Image: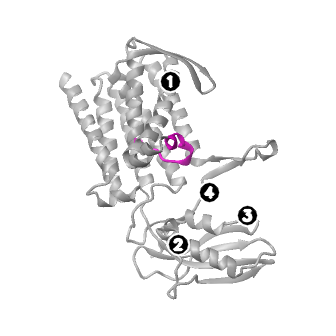
Amino acid sequence: MMILFDYIIWSPDPAIVTIPLSAIGLPDRPIVWYGLLFALGFLLGQQISYRIFKADGQDERDVDTLTTYMVVATIIGARLGHCLFYNPIYYLSNPIEILKVWEGGLASHGGAIGIFVALWIYANYEVKSKWFFIIPLKLSAKKKKKEGQSYLWILDRIAIVVALTGALIRTGNFMNSEMEGVETRSNFGVVYARASKEILDFDEKMVEEVRFEKRADVGSVPGRVPIKAVVTMQSGVRMDAGIEGQLTRNLMGYQEVVDHVDFKSENGTLDYSILQVKGHDVIEINGTGILRHTPQLYEAIACIIITVLLLWLWKYKRHQLNSGVIFGIFMMLLWSDRFFNEFFKMNQEAFEASLPINMGQILSIPMFLVGVAVFFRAVKKG
């Protein structure tokens, strides 16, 4: 029987396009998948929120304020969550590093807490601000509840768009080859080859193209598949002992590569051949790909299902449901999915290997319990 899909070799460029700014003395600026999908999540969420607020008889302009609160709260909360939940000793010793959001490191649990706090402020205070670009010049707040928008009422509606945004963010993680999964130990899965590609594409003046292909021979160990990296050198560049030594050290020495592709042959060296194609050296390096799960996509799919369910509840049942029911369902579904999905994910930090469950699961438990408490409290009121 012919198998149409068994595994894929995943090595996309995280940048969609690079904006050339060198002509004006600035570094070129890449537009990355993660950033685009992150922004798209908030833009789509904003459009959906306009319709929700209009249908509920609320001022649509409030959505703009809410969106600003949520974007700021998500970034600050997610960054602080990553720093304090996963590596507190380092970041508390080097607090300036917390500000380096562009270097990566966001935690969804922290983002959720940030959103809860921001929405509570929105529901209970009138905040006035004056800005100079991104610098706040003046901030003031006075206690004033939003008419017709209780805290739980807001959470019920924002839960819908948060789930949708979560789906897009997790898709961005997949495009970035982040949050890789554990081994499938079967003949189905994904070989994450981005780190290998970055090693092989070591100098644009020497390397023209890097791609990966499946080899024709069949692997004998479940979860291990024969692949090859095909490196096309620039015209006039030849494979020599220096390049071979550099590639050998990097492909066999970097853990990010070794976790996903084993390039070491039986005699401990690179197994490669060189072809001549139209004046170019084409180096074919044999390796063994390690098939892994895609927890980013599992979570994205779950978030889409949750979005559809919550949207249906709001559209057809909101007049029969007490405030807090939709939010409670959201919290129970999202964080229970996150808890079980963590079993398919590689640990983010080394210390998690010594824990019975990882940090993502530990943080998901109180989130789930908050959902349970809010749900049953809301139902009991009915």
Decide: marks 1, 3 in contact (CB < 8 A)?
no
Report crowding for label 1: few under 14, some 14 to 19, many 20 or more residues within 10 A (C-alpha): some
For marks 2 and 4, the one nearer the N-term is: 4
Q: Please name whichever residue, 320 or 360, is drawn nearer the observer in this view of the structure.
A: 360
Tell me the magenta residue range. 96-108
User: Residue 36 location in percent, x, y?
Assistant: 59, 42
Secondary structure under tag 3 reads: loop
Q: Nearer the viewer, mark 2 or mark 4?
A: 2
Q: CA distance from mark 3 to mark 4?
A: 14 Å
Q: CA distance from mark 1 to mark 3?
A: 47 Å
Three-letter code for the amino acid on which mark 4 is drawn? Asp
Reading the image, the residue beneath label 2 is: 253
Q: Is residue 104 magenta?
A: yes
Q: CA distance from mark 1 to mark 2?
A: 52 Å
Reading the image, the residue beneath label 4 is: 13
Q: Please name whichever residue, 112 or 314, is drawn nearer the observer in this view of the structure.
A: 112
Reading the image, the residue beneath label 3 is: 204
